[in-house]
């Protein structure tokens, strides 16, 4: 059984790496890509393309979560991989930017099924959710690093569009490998299933249970939205900010941009070693350090301070993201469904962040997104504090009773 779980874990983490790697492969160079391949000079098309893609993920993610309540999530994942492969092949033969946009939306509808990867791994982990969560975020950030490094090579290809044939082949191979690995679980539903915490199954019944679930869901939605909105509002114009403020080169700006991803990988051992009882306190400490790092990035008097704040930012962000996931999977009774819906709030933050950053830069300065991000994250910390106070009050009431 352990060998089976280990094989499943390796396969799924490989799928996570390839999913993220191929998804962000061209994202740093979309304007150059559309200009080189389709002759699109207007940067407005790039903004519309990114907006349409992110909106698609916001809308499609809950659909896969709803389907997982009716259909085995592993079957849905394989179907999504097959659809992704077909969509990538169609993107490779796109004749204009409109076709490319349509096929991209089709791709993301299917690719949203990859959100099931995470919850499948959590189910297979049993009592080792914390280790899987930490590893997941480390693999995700490693894929972003590798993809960003590779993207410069891809955009310089004579025919960058042809890269989608290779991506389609990778998606097809993933589907085949997952089908082979999951085949045993299709015959025997107990194989690779999660070790379910019986205390979650025997939770409070009736109206009180529904109220707790609703409050938990609303709290998680607000926390996930404010976290991802705040940390992503600083991304769109970061390289322009560093080039203008510190006169860095393109390569140096790219390295500064990647520092948080590198620090997220280094945060993995810390996440794995932290006990479950200390996670709430650890989250608050990391959250306040993240808040300070956002301010320092915006007002850094020198490059050394910027590098230090970027390191602190990436390290603390990885910890906060991992702890939020651990908390969700500990409390959720339907991980696939809840995670898919909450991921929509994450993508809503990703959707609004670039638009807000553009407005801030146009109306104020290149440093203003950092201050705005710190303000939004302060609201995030207030929500955390209010939720902690409410939990303590409820526990105190129960103890008195």
Image: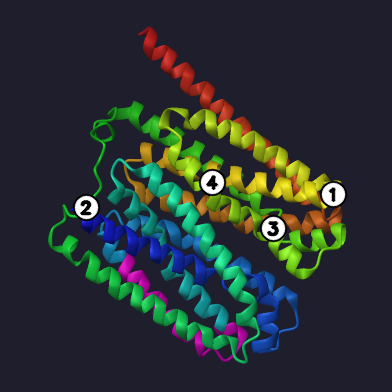
The disc at residue 267 is 4
Question: How crowded is the residue under tag 2: few (<14 C-alpha within 10 Å), some, or many (20+)?
Answer: few
If the image is split into quadrants, where does the C terminus sit? top left
Instruction: Tell me residue 377's x, y (percent).
Output: 66, 40
Q: Circle 3 sits on which residue?
A: 235
Q: Circle 1 sits on which residue?
A: 302
N-terminal label among 1 and 2: 2
Q: Is residue 248 left or right of residue 90?
A: right
> Cβ–Cβ below 8 Å for labels 1 and 2?
no
Is residue 2 visible in this depiction of the protein? yes
Q: For residue 255, what is the image quadrant?
A: bottom right
The disc at residue 2 is 2
Q: Is residue 304 left or right of residue 312?
A: right
Q: Is residue 255 above or below residue 316?
A: below
Q: In the image, which residues are magenta?
A: 77-99
N-terminal label among 1 and 4: 4
Instruction: Tell me residue 399's x, y (percent).
Output: 38, 11
N-terminal label among 4 and 3: 3
Q: For residue 257, what is the image quadrant?
A: bottom right
N-terminal label among 2 and 4: 2
Name the residue at 55% across, 56% down: 347
Disc 3/disc 1 C-alpha distance (Å): 19 Å
Front residue (pair 388, 4): 4
Question: How crowded is the residue under tag 3: few (<14 C-alpha within 10 Å), some, or many (20+)?
Answer: some
């Amino acid at each position: 059984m352990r060998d089976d779980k280990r094989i499943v874990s390796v396969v799924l983490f490989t799928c996570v790496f390839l999913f993220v790697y191929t998804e962000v492969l061209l994202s740093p160079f979309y304007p150059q890509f559309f200009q080189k391949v389709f002759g699109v000079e207007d940067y407005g098309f790039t903004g519309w393309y990114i907006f349409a893609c992110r909106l698609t993920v916001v809308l499609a993610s809950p659909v896969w979560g709803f389907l997982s309540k009716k259909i085995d999530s592993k079957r849905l994942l394989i179907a999504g991989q097959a659809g992704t492969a077909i969509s990538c092949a169609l993107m490779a033969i796109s004749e204009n930017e409109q076709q490319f946009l349509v096929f991209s939306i089709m791709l993301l509808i299917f690719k949203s099924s990859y959100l099931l990867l995470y919850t499948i791994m959590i189910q297979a982990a049993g009592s080792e959710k914390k280790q899987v969560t930490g590893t997941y975020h480390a693999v995700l950030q490693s894929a972003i690093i590798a993809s960003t490094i590779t993207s410069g090579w891809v955009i310089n290809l004579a025919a960058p569009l042809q890269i989608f044939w290779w991506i389609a082949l990778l998606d097809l191979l993933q589907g085949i490998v997952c089908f082979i690995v999951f085949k045993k679980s299709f015959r025997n539903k107990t194989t690779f299933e999660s070790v379910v915490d019986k205390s979650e199954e025997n939770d409070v019944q009736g109206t009180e249970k529904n109220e707790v679930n609703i409050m938990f869901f609303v709290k998680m939605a607000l926390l996930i939205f404010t976290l991802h909105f705040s940390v992503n509002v600083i991304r769109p114009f970061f390289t322009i900010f560093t080039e203008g403020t510190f006169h860095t080169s393109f390569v140096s700006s790219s390295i500064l941009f990647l520092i948080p991803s590198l620090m997220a990988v280094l945060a993995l051992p810390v996440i794995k070693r932290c006990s479950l009882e200390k996670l709430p306190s650890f989250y608050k400490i990391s959250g306040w350090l993240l808040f300070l790092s956002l301010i320092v990035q915006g007002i850094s008097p020198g490059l050394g301070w910027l590098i230090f704040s970027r390191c602190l930012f990436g390290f603390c962000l990885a910890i906060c993201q991992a702890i939020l996931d651990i908390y969700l999977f500990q409390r959720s009774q339907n991980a696939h469904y809840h995670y898919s819906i909450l991921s929509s709030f994450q993508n809503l933050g990703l959707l609004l962040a670039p638009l807000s950053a553009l407005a801030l830069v146009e109306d104020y300065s290149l440093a203003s997104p950092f201050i705005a991000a710190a303000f939004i994250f302060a609201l995030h910390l207030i929500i955390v504090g209010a939720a902690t106070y409410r939990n303590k009050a409820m526990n105190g009431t129960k103890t008195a009773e």
